Image (tube, rainbow, N blue to C red):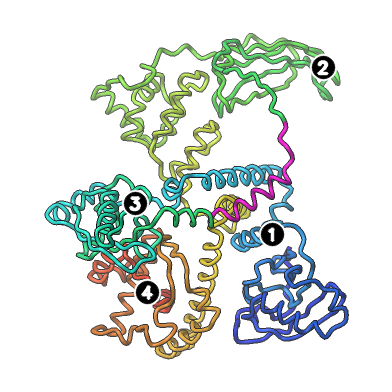
């Protein structure tokens, strides 16, 4: 449990860069130091200040170099944290109390650093997984970590071209869109492409057919270079690839140039595409940089991992090949409490959900005692090969006074063959289609006659195509005690369209225990928004995120940067909302926010961020935050501030809608009222202006939320 808050430090961390905090330091020599530091100072800067102040203290000479030590503190989650990443600022660490302890480094520094970064991304320490004492969680973490690290190593061993295909997949337009646009844009004229070689300022304008492949463009660029620079040595086109200028986006493969989204958008907008010829050695350098940390972690784990145990030879046998009746040996019971005048009888049955798979088997009668003994073999009227995976064996123990009458057989009558096994050749008449529609339209129809069961099974492909929401009815009439039908229903589920959430929840009933049905249900419900405040859901997504980070260590840095930028944007959002509630003038809010953004901590956090909406784009800096070069909305030529605000709010709402967020009724009404602005912004949304000021986005969010509250 996190410790209670006994001081007002949380407000201090929020006012980063504006206040100083008196920090207390405990040195390994037993010396205590205390001096003020800025909330925006990095851990490395604080360590230098500590070393400078410790020079005049006793026992300083026995200390090693600063790199041999690391700060530790108690964080907000009551976890002892080693501050391995010394580029973090004090306001980002946010310790529970302003106390740092200097200790000698132990263990692997890279491993500790990665664990700390993953904990920050999760929002909770990895120690919470360890303290759960859940065998399933421990087994999942162990196996998934080994699996993810193994796949990461396999990726690093790929040739440069295959590695590029994996990390930078082609961003293509759908064939239908490209072909329709090609009639008006690409089939009547050539396309001019500006190509330059890396580490060179010279560029060439090349004319090609939009249907040409990227390899044709590479060959043309190499020929042009050889002609201009009179080079004798011929370079191989296979050693080069094309990169979009200013983006992590590559153009390669056996696709026409007009299929690539970047070139397609340039054609559509009448602009010239700008590309760079990149040698494969540059791609190899990226590959080595990405695999550096992964290789280090793998070496450390290989050294500490015990040798694997030799695998035992296992003899496997297909269950479908066992054509013997299922049987059990009923031995004895213990601690049975019953009247001595009674006889004890055991009944056993096999169930799949609520369906009885075969006739109930009854044991012989034995006299009542504390430990009755039957020592009898019970034989069931079903073969082992026909037992479903989720079969349950149920017992009933009862006493009888008199010999019971002969029970009626519960064995089901033999049903006629329903149709061809594959169901492909089943031809239905018009009357059968009408009967099928009547059955599926009756929502309360859960008990079926034999002819109705035969019809549903015969037209199961029709149900998949026209009535997919009636899957539960098909599952109810399936013979789960026939492995042939079970195999067919499993194959049918793999091609069954996803169901709405209401119909998918129906399949979670105990009547459908088959694991394939449960997997299909989970697939349908995966689109629902998860409630992360539920502990089980939070645990699930925490384990998934940890597994992803273990397999993509190189991506942790970008995720940390995005998380930091998001926190700063949230702080700006809160600042704007509080200013609106205080009825501060809009111009004053803008000026105060620009002053806030110009702080070093904000400029660093909001610069060089990989766009979450498009990972190929890097948001370099905030436009207008660092001088007069930027242009705010009041300076935009030809547009009033209200027009600029409406345009920015429409863009933000469209981006939220594109990301799948549900808009409020007032926001939907706002988009309807400004339909013309919506139409113009929709065409610009794919090429979102990355130089747009972050203050505009924050203002749009805040103003929208304020209006909703007023309404």
Q: Which residues are magenta?
A: 290-309
Tag nearer the camera, 4 or 3 = 3
Q: Main secondary structure of the magenta part?
A: helix
Mark 4 neighbour density, 10 Å: few (under 14) some (14–19) many (20 or more): few
For label 2, the residue is: 372
Image: 102 above or below 125: below
For label 4, the residue is: 691
Do the residues under discs 3 and 1 have CB atoms within 8 angstroms? Answer: no
- Under circle 3, the secondary element is loop
For label 3, the residue is: 235
- Under circle 1, the secondary element is helix
Tag nearer the camera, 3 or 2 = 3
* Quadrant in the picture for the C terminus: bottom left
- Under circle 2, the secondary element is loop
- Dot 2 or dot 4, earlier in sequence: 2
Tag nearer the camera, 2 or 1 = 1
* Residue 179 locus on image (x, y percent): 20, 48
- Dot 3 or dot 1, earlier in sequence: 1
- Dot 4 or dot 3, earlier in sequence: 3
- Under circle 4, the secondary element is loop
For label 1, the residue is: 112
336 is within the stretch colored magenta: no
* Residue 695 locus on image (x, y percent): 42, 79
297 is within the stretch colored magenta: yes
* Residue 520 locus on image (x, y percent): 47, 38
Left or right of residue 418, residue 521 in this image: right
Query: 133 or 27, which is in the foreground?
Result: 27
């Amino acid at each position: 449990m996190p410790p209670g808050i006994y001081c007002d430090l949380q407000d201090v961390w929020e006012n980063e860069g504006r206040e100083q905090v008196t920090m207390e330091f405990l040195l390994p020599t037993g010396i205590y130091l205390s001096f003020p530091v800025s909330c925006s100072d990095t851990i490395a800067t604080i360590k230098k200040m500590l070393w400078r102040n410790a020079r005049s203290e006793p026992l300083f000479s026995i200390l090693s170099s600063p790199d041999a030590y690391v700060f530790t503190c108690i964080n907000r989650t009551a976890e002892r944290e080693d501050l391995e990443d010394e580029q973090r600022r004090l306001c980002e660490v946010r310790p529970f109390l302003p106390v740092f302890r200097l200790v000698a480094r132990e263990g692997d520094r890279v491993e500790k650093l990665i664990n700390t970064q993953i904990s920050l991304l999760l929002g909770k320490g990895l120690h919470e997984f360890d303290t759960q004492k859940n065998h399933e969680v421990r087994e999942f973490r162990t196996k998934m970590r080994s699996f993810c690290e193994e796949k990461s190593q396999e990726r690093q061993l790929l040739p440069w071209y295959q590695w590029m295909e994996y990390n930078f997949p082609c961003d293509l337009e759908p064939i239908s869109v490209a072909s329709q646009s090609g009639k008006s844009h690409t089939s009547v004229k050539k396309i001019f492409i500006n190509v330059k070689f890396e580490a060179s300022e010279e560029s060439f304008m090349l004319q090609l057919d939009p249907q040409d492949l990227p390899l044709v463009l590479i060959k043309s660029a190499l020929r042009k270079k050889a002609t201009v620079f009179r080079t004798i040595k011929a370079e191989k086109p296979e050693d080069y690839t094309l990169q979009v200028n200013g983006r992590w986006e590559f153009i390669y493969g056996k696709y026409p140039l007009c299929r690539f989204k970047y070139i397609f958008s340039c054609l559509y907008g009448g602009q010239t595409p700008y590309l760079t010829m990149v040698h494969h050695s540059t791609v190899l350098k990226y590959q080595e940089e990405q695999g550096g940390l992964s290789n280090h972690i793998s070496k450390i784990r290989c050294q500490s991992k015990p040798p694997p145990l030799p695998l035992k030879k296992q003899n496997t046998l297909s269950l479908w090949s066992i054509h013997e009746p299922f049987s059990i040996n009923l031995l004895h019971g213990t601690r049975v409490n019953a009247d001595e005048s009674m006889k004890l009888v055991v009944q056993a049955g096999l169930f799949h959900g609520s369906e009885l798979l075969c006739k109930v088997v009854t044991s012989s009668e034995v006299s009542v005692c504390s430990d009755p003994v039957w020592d009898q073999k019970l034989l069931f009227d079903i073969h082992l090969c026909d037992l479903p995976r989720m079969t349950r064996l149920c017992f009933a123990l009862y006493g009888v006074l008199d010999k019971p009458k002969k029970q009626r057989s519960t064995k089901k009558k033999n049903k006629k063959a329903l149709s061809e096994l594959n169901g492909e050749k089943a031809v239905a008449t018009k009357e059968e289609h009408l009967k099928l529609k009547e059955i599926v339209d009756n929502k309360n129809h859960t008990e079926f006659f034999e002819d109705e069961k035969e019809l549903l099974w015969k037209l199961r492909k029709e149900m998949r195509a026209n009535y997919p929401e009636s899957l539960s009815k098909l599952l109810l009439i399936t013979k789960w005690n026939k492995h042939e039908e079970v195999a067919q229903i499993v194959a049918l589920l793999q091609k069954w369209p996803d169901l709405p959430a209401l119909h998918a929840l129906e399949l979670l009933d105990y009547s459908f225990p088959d694991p394939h049905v449960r997997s299909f249900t989970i697939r349908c419900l995966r689109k629902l928004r998860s409630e992360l405040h539920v502990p089980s859901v939070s645990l699930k997504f925490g384990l998934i995120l940890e597994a992803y980070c273990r397999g993509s260590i190189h991506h942790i840095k970008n995720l940390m940067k995005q998380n930091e930028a998001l926190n700063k944007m949230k702080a700006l959002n809160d600042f704007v909302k509080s200013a609106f509630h205080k009825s501060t003038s809009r111009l004053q809010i803008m000026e105060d926010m620009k002053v806030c953004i110009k702080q070093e901590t904000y400029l660093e956090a909001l610069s060089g961020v990989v766009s979450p909406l498009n990972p190929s784009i890097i948001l370099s800096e905030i436009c207008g935050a660092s001088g007069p070069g930027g242009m705010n909305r009041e300076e935009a030529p030809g547009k009033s501030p209200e027009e600029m605000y409406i345009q920015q709010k429409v863009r933000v709402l469209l981006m939220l809608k594109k990301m799948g967020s549900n808009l409020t009724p007032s926001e939907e009404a706002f988009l309807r009222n400004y339909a013309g602005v919506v139409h113009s912004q929709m065409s610009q949304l794919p090429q979102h202006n990355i130089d747009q000021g972050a203050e505009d986005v924050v203002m749009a969010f805040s103003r929208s939320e304020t209006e909703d509250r007023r309404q």
